[in-house]
Image (cartoon, helix red, strand yellow):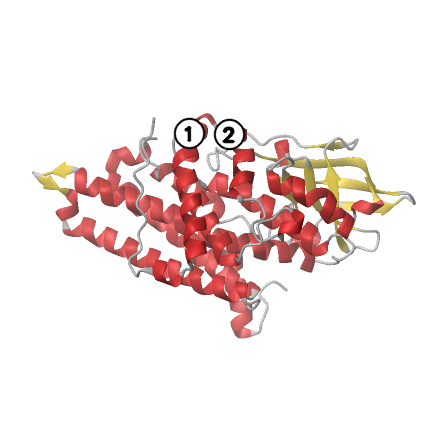
Amino acid sequence: MHKDRFTAPDYYQLDELFTSEQILIRNTARDWVKAHISPIIEKAAQDAVFPKHIIPELGKLGAFGPTIPPEYGGGGLDYTSYGLIMQELERGDSGIRSTASVQGSLVMFPIYKYGSEEQKRKYLPKLASGEWMGCFGLTEPDYGSDPGSMKTHFEDKGSYYLLNGAKMWISNAPFAEVAVVWAKDENGKIKGLIVERGMEGFTTPETHGKWSLRASATGELVFDNVKVPKENLFPNASGLRGPLGCLDQARYGIAWGAVGAAMDCYDSALRYSQERIQFSKPIASFQLTQKKLSEMITEITKAQLLCWRLGNLKNEGRASTQQVSLAKRNNVAMALDIAREARQIHGAMGITGDYPIMRHMMNLESVITYEGTHDIHLLITGEHITGVSAFR
């Protein structure tokens, strides 16, 4: 069984910037990952199986909707604590973080933000505990970066809405009990609906053959004349602002999560360089290896500081969409670069399941394009600083 020897890098003593409660939350998540994810994750990834048995444990950990108020089953935590949980989960595996991130940011958040009181009471406590799992339907086969052109639509049939269309690349879809689905009404306005498993005409075929996020379940959402009760429509969301507001939440968690993946690759590379002997001495003694490791810790430290500041802005309600985009783009690219450099340090061993490097690298190839591609986030920043949109 894989022994987790991870030691977190903290080159600038960032722990001094966190509260005692935030550190306790992070350490609890870190210990949980060491005990429950590290021993099983390599086999789960090799077998392309999501370890569903961890769902109730994630609920007990408080990883589902940690910022949702306790009255609805959430943890009522601040955004820095939420980010630290995502960091630790992705240190274990991006797919595990994705499962929690989708549940909290893309399912529970919109129900809390845009839903009716009845919807909140019905869904949030069961989602928080993991009794029910959810998924988020925005991306379509023909529309990823351009969600405003979606084809999924619904019609008012008097006593219900009739939903038709399809969504693709949906995390948690194969086993989700609840789907938050974004579709156009008869006037072309984007609205959010809650679709439940068991509704006639609603199917969730699983996506197979992935080289990335192999320990995460991905699928489609297919709606063939699905009758959705009218009480399942979000009363407080209209237009793209609804789903994009959810993506802000998820991208924030990704910015923290990517740091966790980078930390794991760096820690493994540092330890390996100290133990691997070539030319009668550890490869850590060679200048090029030290260059790689020094650049890794520099970039990780910068990303940690970026997350810390963004967390403070989120807690104050001042973090903008553009600031979240910048952090997501920077930190995921940083993590992917570090995974590639760490693979070089590990040599041939870096491609095996004995080390986490190749798994993180493949996962990050998905993370760098989902929730907004690397280039889209660049253009979000570009529009903000120039005042000119590159999308229209």
Please report the residue visible at 46 percent of the width from the left and 42 percent of the height from the top.
94
* Percent x, y of residue 228: 81, 40
Q: Provide the residue designation for mark 2.
A: 51
- At horizontal 35% and vertical 48% (from top left) the residue drawn is 263
Answer above or below: position of 30 versus 303: above
Q: Who comes first in sequence, dot 2 or dot 1?
A: 1
Q: Is residue 210 left or right of residue 179?
A: left
Question: Which labelled disc corresponds to residue 40?
Answer: 1
Which type of secondary structure does the marked residue at label 2 adopt?
Answer: loop
Structural distance between the alpha carbons of marks 2 and 1: 8 Å
Q: Nearer the viewer, residue 200 or 133?
A: 133
Locate the C terminus and report the quarter of the image it occupies: bottom right
Q: Is residue 307 above or below residue 218?
A: below
Report if the CB atoms under discs 2 and 1 are less than 8 Å apart: yes
Residue that protrudes farthest toward the left in the picture: 280
Toward the viewer: 210 or 56? 56
**Mark 1: amino acid:** Ile
For residue 3, side relative to residue 307 (left or right): left
